């Protein structure tokens, strides 16, 4: 049932038609649900209903004012973000132009903005060569001749949107930027083409990263100095050293199943396989003295030039009987 609405003509005359319509809408819809609450709408001051901004945009609400959307709409006549054209004039300190006294576009001088602060705003400003890249402050801009997979490329120096200003032209004018060869996609999360592992290795993808990391009694360690995997006959040796001098070595005898994806190796005094750890003070711990470590091989191509990925966890023991917990161990690397 609608609430009784009573207005004096004097009060009604002081309200705009839009205000009256809005008031009637609010009062009339106040009983449209079981909780007697006003449903979501385009006038509630809340970002809902799939709106682009509060109470505007989306499939239901009126379009947002392009002069207030926080975007540089050059096609609508703006000369910079939400200013110029039919919008208000641009502030000299934020107009996309290097004005007198500024050391870069909209930075330095009296602006109070350091040019390096603009490297992540999605605009070509500061001392940038491309949007948020290049110059003395930002990361280098990608090109299709830098031997990297960067920008939105799907392979090393191929498959990018090279017509966008996130890329700089190559110094060699004879270089043509274009698509990757058929079947190449180093960003699809799949091991395909001639990739050594998922989205890495081969002729067109970045090199596969060598990783060996673990926790020793809760302390995270990452092998940074050296990371290696070698096949000695049927024995797989995995090891590495950290910058602090800690080291870990896995000597893994081939399991009964052979070296296949999903293989499991138990390191213990009785198995012939071992896991050894040395802390930065050169104190040694090993399954040769007790404890046990389980190694799971999730992927392996068991040959020189192949690749291996796995995890490990367990306990190693020192020569005097003290134990060390090894947890969250993980490795991936090319096999030498």
Image: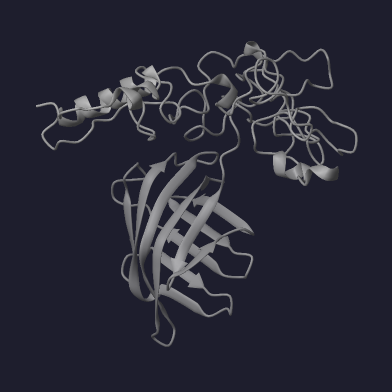
In screen coordinates, is 222 left or right of 174? left
Measuring 57% from the left and 78% from the top, which residue is drawn there?
Answer: 282
Q: Position of residue 57 (x, y in %)?
A: 43, 21
Measuring 19% from the left and 31% from the top, which residue is drawn there?
Answer: 30
Q: Position of residue 262 (x, y in %)?
A: 31, 45
Q: Residue furthest bottom?
A: 320
Measuring 46% from the left and 29% from the top, which residue is drawn there?
Answer: 53
Quadrant in the picture for residue 27 = top left
In screen coordinates, is 207 left or right of 145? left
Q: Is residue 21 visible?
A: yes
Colour scheme of the rendered structure: one colour
Q: Is residue 268 visible?
A: no
Q: Residue furthest right?
A: 100
Measuring 57% from the left and 44% from the top, which residue is drawn there?
Answer: 209
In screen coordinates, is 241 left or right of 89? left
As drawn, 240 above or below 33: below
Using the image as rendered, state which of residue 297 and residue 303 is in the foreground.
297
Number of numbered discs on residues:
0
Using the image as rendered, state which of residue 1 and residue 320 is in the foreground.
1
Using the image as rendered, state which of residue 233 and residue 157 is in the foreground.
157
Quadrant for the N terminus, please.
top left
Q: Position of residue 324 (x, y in %)?
A: 41, 76
Using the image as rendered, state which of residue 3 and residue 182 is in the foreground.
3
Q: Position of residue 98 (x, y in %)?
A: 84, 30
């Amino acid at each position: 049932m609608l609430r009784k609405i009573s207005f004096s003509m004097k009060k009604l005359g002081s309200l705009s038609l839009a205000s009256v319509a809005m008031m009637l809408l609010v009062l009339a819809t106040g009983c449209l649900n079981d909780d007697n609450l006003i449903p979501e709408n385009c006038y509630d001051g809340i970002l809902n209903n799939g709106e682009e901004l509060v109470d505007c945009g989306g499939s239901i609400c009126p379009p947002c004012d392009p002069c207030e959307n926080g975007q540089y709409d050059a096609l609508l006549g703006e000369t910079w973000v939400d200013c110029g054209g039919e919008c208000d004039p641009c502030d000299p300190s934020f107009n996309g132009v290097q004005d007198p006294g500024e050391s870069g576009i909209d930075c330095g001088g009296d602006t109070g903005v350091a040019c390096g602060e603009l490297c992540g705003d999605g605009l070509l400003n500061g001392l940038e060569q491309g949007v948020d890249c290049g110059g003395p402050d930002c990361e280098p801009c990608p090109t299709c001749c830098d031997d990297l997979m960067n920008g939105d490329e799907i392979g090393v120096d191929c498959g990018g949107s090279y017509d966008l200003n996130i890329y700089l032209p190559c110094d060699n004018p004879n270089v043509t930027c274009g698509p990757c060869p058929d079947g190449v996609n180093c960003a699809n999360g799949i091991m395909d083409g001639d990739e050594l592992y998922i989205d890495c290795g081969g002729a067109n993808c970045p090199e596969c990263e060598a990783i060996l990391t673990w926790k020793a009694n809760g302390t995270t360690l990452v092998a940074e100095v050296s990371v290696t995997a070698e096949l000695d006959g049927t024995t797989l040796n995995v090891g590495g050293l950290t910058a602090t001098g800690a080291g870990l070595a896995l000597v893994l005898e081939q399991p009964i199943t052979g070296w296949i994806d999903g293989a499991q190796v138990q390191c213990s005094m009785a198995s012939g396989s071992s896991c050894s750890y040395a802390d930065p003070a050169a104190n040694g711990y090993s399954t040769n003295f007790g404890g046990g470590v389980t190694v799971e091989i999730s992927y392996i191509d068991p040959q020189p030039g192949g690749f291996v990925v796995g995890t490990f966890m367990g306990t190693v023991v020192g020569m005097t009987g003290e134990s060390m917990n090894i947890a969250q161990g993980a490795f991936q690397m090319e096999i030498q």
